[in-house]
Amino acid sequence: MRVALVHDWLTGMRGGEKVLEVLCELYPDAHLYTLLHVPGSVSSGIERHPIHTSFVQSLPFAARLYRRYLPIFPWAIERFRFDGYDLVISSSHCVAKSAVTPDGTRHICYCHSPMRYAWDQFDAYFGAERVGALASRWVYRPVLDRLARWDAATAARVNRFVANSQHVAGRIRRYYNRQAAVVHPPVDTAFFQPGTSTPENHFLIVSALVPYKRIELAIQACAHIGAELRIIGDGPDRTRLEQSAGSGVTFLGPRSGETLRDEYRRARAVLLPGEEDFGIVPVEAQACGTPVVALARGGALETVADGETGVLFDESTVSAMADALQRVGALGVDAARLHQHAERFSRQRHVHAIRSIVDETMAAPAGTRW
């Protein structure tokens, strides 16, 4: 069986890339198609595959400013050709799901989220406070409205949707009018294990530094109670956040492997201040025996057991989050119990579920849509 994998862009190892990494292991001979590839930014398991990039790769400053080329992404993804492939699996949070496949080729989309900025998070990325009132209304709003219409219209190109959470499955129903099976992303619970040392007295964030993550809320909540905060990650919001953060906040940049695991183990709790579609970080933290403080929306409702493996707060306010930070200190933490909870999202379960969906999809008549 000839398989092609499609991913929006390859610029770092986040949750979507961890799903892609498993797909690359399951299909070692697959070719990989992506709008843009920054060499060395993803794992060797991904980069050993033949990687085909779009014309976005050759645009000026694409490696750093690729998001600014968003309006032409639909044209770029539709230029790929998949003749001769039996199966296309797209790993999509932007345009990968809209790849054009020939008749008879099955297309499974593992959807991390329908395009956030085009549907329900426009203000976080392109609101007046971000780009100015005139640009927001007269430039970005028409472009994103057009992208939303295109995104909905091209959902029919997918034979079967797979969502990374019940939350995203609901968004797929709402925006695409399609059903989706739910397969949670893989967490390496064999690697992320509790340590033996006593946690320290600071909080931790592991996140891309982008608007919808609401990192500034966590910074303000920690300052409110006089707690130190360490932040792992990078992104376009880093400069703005560093300028507004006080002396109690340390920006560590990207971290991975044993260094990341050690940071999880050292933290009093890991913080999730924004609404996540799923959120691998809270599960990795719990696998390390560290509780989570999270906004009670989105994927956190599926991964964090309030009062047991962490604390959920209902309102996206400094006072509500600060109260949750204080409550997590009184939580009786059993590292082994937290790890056991995280096992529900193990890599082994993910692989088994993906294989079952592929087998069922390939056994169905060509053209079948779920």
Image (tube, helix red, strand yellow):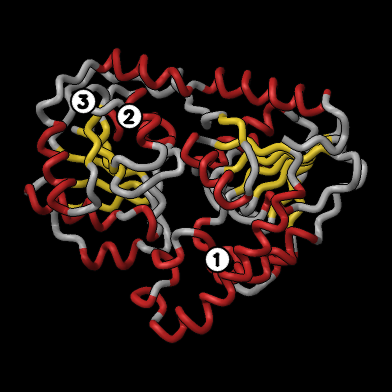
Q: Residues within 10 Å of mark 2 (few under 14, many from 20)?
A: many
SS type, badge 2: loop
The image shows residue 112, relative to residue 285, as above or below, that is: below
Q: How many numbered tags mark residues here?
A: 3
Foreground mark, 3 or 1, reads 3
Instruction: Measure the alpha-carbon separation of dots 3 and 1.
Output: 39 Å
Residue identified by numbered label 3: 307
Q: Residue at x 40, y 72 (%)?
A: 127
Instruction: Determine whether label 1 and label 2 are within 8 Å by CB.
Output: no
Location of residue 304 in the rendering, given as x and y in whole percent from the top left corner: 32, 29
Residue identified by numbered label 1: 67
SS type, badge 1: helix
Residue identified by numbered label 2: 304
SS type, badge 3: loop
Q: Residue at x 16, y 51 (%)?
A: 221
Location of residue 295 in the rendering, given as x and y in whole percent from the top left corner: 28, 43
In primary-sequence order, the first of circles 1 and 2 is 1
Q: Amino acid at mark 2?
A: Val
Outermost residue toward the bottom?
Answer: 134
The image shows residue 73, relative to residue 34, as above or below, that is: below
Location of residue 40 in the rendering, given as x and y in whole percent from the top left corner: 59, 48
Quarter holding residue 158 = top right
From this viewpoint, is residue 302 visible?
yes
Quarter holding residue 115 = bottom right
